[in-house]
Amino acid sequence: MAQILTGRTNASIEDSVLWVNMILERLELPLLSEFGVCNTSFEQVAADAMKSVAIKGNPIPLTEDRLIFILDQVCQCHSDGQPLVIEEGTEVEIRNNPVETD
């Protein structure tokens, strides 16, 4: 993937992460907090999202639990004010739905 993204045959995983971060920075996408997501329940956001027709076209099947997990990962507005940090190779359990992180 790194080779495809960067166009370099010697690209590493770290290069692909840097490339994605660079693209996101260039796009200047607003943070979810700017849409008020931090001021509402992630459970409610996930429940509303599950009603959307667009979610059925996602290549990975999504559940409310997975959506909440994703919001926890991308939102910088956790209840304790600290970003969620997951160490490489650890397992995270979300309501009896284990998710391996690599």
Image (cartoon, helix red, strand yellow):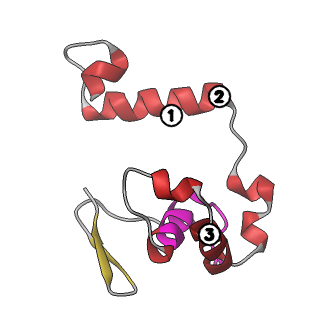
Report whether 98 appears left or right of 34: left
Q: Residues within 10 Å of mark 3 (few under 14, many from 20)?
A: few
Mark 2 surroundings: few (<14), some (14-19) or many (≥20) residues within 10 A: few
Q: Is residue 72 left or right of residue 28?
A: left
Q: Which mark is residue 27?
A: 2
Q: Amino acid at mark 2?
A: Leu
Q: Amino acid at mark 1?
A: Asn
Label 1 residue SS: helix
Please tell me in which quadrant of the rendered image residue 94 appears. Answer: bottom left
The reply to whether dot 3 and dot 2 touch (C-beta < 8 Å) is no
Write down the residue under mark 3: 51
Closer to us: 52 or 42: 52
In the rendered image, the vertical position of residue 64 relative to residue 86, given as above or below: below
Locate residue 55, reporting x and y percent.
53, 58
**Which of pointers 3 and 2 indicates the residue nearer the eye?**
3
Measured Cα–Cα span from mark 1 to mark 3: 30 Å
**Label for residue 21?**
1
User: Is 16 on the left-hand or right-hand side of 48?
Assistant: left
Q: Residue at x 53, y 27 (%)?
A: 22
Q: From which residue to which does the magenta span run? A: 67-83
Give the secondary structure at mark 2. Answer: helix
> Closer to the N terminus: mark 3 or mark 2?
2
